[in-house]
Image (spheres, helix red, strand yellow):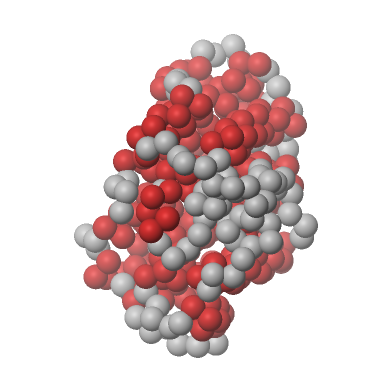
Amino acid sequence: MTSTVPPLHAPGRRASPLPSRAERVAAVRALMGQPDRSVRHLALGIRATARRHFDRHVEPLIEATWPALRGTAFEEKLRIGACDLYASAPYTALFCAPRRPPLVRVVTDVGNLLPLPLPALSLLGRVAMEALGRVAYARQHRSIALISAFIVVVDHALDHCMDDPPALRGPRLEAIIAGRSPATGPALALTRALAVAMAEGLDPDERVAFERAMERMTGWIRAEVRAMLGEPDPAGLGHRLAGVEGTIDGLLFPVLRYAGEGARAWMYDVSLFVQVMDDWFDYEADARSDRATPVTTGDWTFADVAAAWRRSADGIEALVRASGLDSPRYVRFVRESYVLMMHEVMEAMAERPDA
């Protein structure tokens, strides 16, 4: 598949001195603007649903493969990453999909047609999201929980749980995921268990989407290895693009039949913004490490952070309108909900220590 993520940069720009981390964080806060917290109920509903299905489908795998994970810092990182960050994207795409499933369509059409104020719309969205999380679309909820956790665990295992030289680390991880090699250690056992669970019970269309997504996830792992080896990225992106596209293709497969390619392009934009922002905030830590990032090389600057943010925020409006939900009030509600959720992601990143 040809990438749909447009370039943000001019490869080979010279790095220039950056403001302090605190100043960089303040600049991103100003860029994103003040969020409307009256729409927070929708985000709460999405996260409550994601956590319910994480507990139902991921926690038993943790208990079976890595019970010592409980109470650790990574357990909390896994739950936050899977439920509060990654799962939000496919759920948002589902509610903005042109081929929304019937119960979702009823809720969104009511929100689009009734002249409700934004807080009431948000509360309606929360009630509907939590109800649907309990009584409908069990297959989609399960797949979203599993793939969201898989992405976090794979990233952690590759960076922190494998002693192999980088050139061998990626192939061994791929073999473990595919079942061609035994998993050694609890992190890799959990990785394999999540991969097995994701592949179970898929119908033919879901299996096609899943296998394509796993191919892109494999591309992400291989790109990470190239970055570890210090191989230059001709695109000047520090091998980030494969991660942007691979993780999103994974997250999209549970709802692809409803959401379509418009959602994929928007989710790429969201993922790219998060990656650019993450590298922008972590400049000092990355500069001390062995891995160059597009910010440490000067290929990404604040102008790129701003461009990525505006494209993702404008993109959610376009996605909603393309789905037939075009009342100005409803479009504003969805945009404000997205802005608030991304503000919370940004603040969580900003609070991390400069390790």
Image x and y of residue 24, in percent: 42, 35
Up the image or down, 253 lies above or below 290; here it is above
Q: Position of residue 5 (x, y in %)?
A: 70, 48
Instruction: Determine the residue positioned at 52% across, 42% down.
Output: 16
Image quarter where the C terminus lies is bottom left
Residue 26 seen anywhere in this rendered image of the structure: yes
Q: Position of residue 38 (x, y in %)?
A: 42, 20
Horizontally, is 39 left or right of 246 in the view?
left
User: In this orientation, which residue lies closer to the viewer: 2 or 288?
Assistant: 288
Image height check: is 314 above or below 179?
A: above
Direction bottom: furthest residue: 181
9 is higher (above) or lower (below) than 74: above
Residue at x 56%, y 22% (from the top left corner): 333
Residue at 44% x, 66% y: name it.
290
**Which residue is most to the right?**
2
Give the residue drawn at x 45%, y 40%.
18
Q: Is residue 202 visible?
A: no
Q: Quadrant of the N terminus?
A: bottom right
5 left or right of 274 in image = right
Q: Nearer the viewer, residue 25 or 148?
A: 25
Q: Measuring from the top left, give residue 148's x and y in whole percent.
A: 49, 56
Instruction: Specify the farthest residue to the left.
Output: 71
Can you tell which quarter of the image residue 106 is in? top right
Who is closer to the viewer here, 100 or 165? 165
Q: How many marks?
A: 0
